[in-house]
Amino acid sequence: MTPKEQFDACAKLAELAGGRHDARRSYEWKVSLGLWAALLASAAVIKTSLPWWSPFALTAFYVVTWLIPLWMANDNDKIRFDHFYSEAARVLTVGVHGIGSDPRPRTGSALDRGYFKDWSMWFNTLVTFVLAMMVVLKSRGYVG
């Protein structure tokens, strides 16, 4: 491969990883807002008393089934983007060289990988829990 071909290939792979991340971000906030809107709407229509543990269960379900897989996919795309962006820059500075293969996704739990260092995950978790707690308190008559 010529240096231009190597650069173009690396740039395209970096662009693909960045595009996947951006596309995911474009609907992740819509899902979160939809859940929060549903929680607010349910506070107005629920007439029976909900169990005290339901905000914990809902938040745990949301985190385990949506937030953690979303965060891990975003993290892997960031790793891929950084790798191929660096390789493209290296082609420009060094010239033709052996391009490192696609980095393997990081393994391990999201907790090991920094999930709770991400402020947006904390924000999503906290808002979901507070809104769910508000629904329970309203259903029990504690909130007007």
Image (cartoon, grey):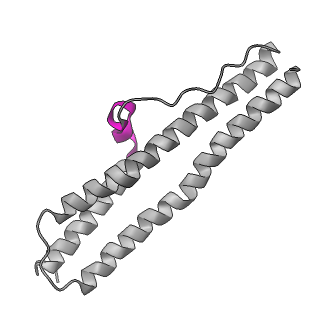
Quarter of the picture holding the C terminus = bottom left
| Position above or below: 139 against 99 | below
* Quadrant position of residue 34: bottom left
Horizontally, residue 139 falls left or right of residue 1, namely left
Q: How many marks?
A: 0
Q: Locate residue 24, reporting x and y percent.
A: 56, 53
Q: Residue at x 74, y 14 (%)?
A: 98
Q: Is residue 81 visible?
A: yes
Residue 7 in picture, x, y percent from top left: 80, 27
Q: Which residues are magenta?
A: 110-119
Is any atom of residue 123 visible in this view? no
**Residue at (25% x, 79% y) in the render:** 43
Q: Is residue 124 magenta?
A: no
The residue closer to the viewer here, 66 or 89, is 66
Name the side, left or right, on which 136 lies relative to 69. Answer: left
Horizontal relation, residue 40 to residue 141: left or right: right
* Nearer to us in this view, 92 or 3: 3
Residue at (16% x, 79% y) in the render: 139
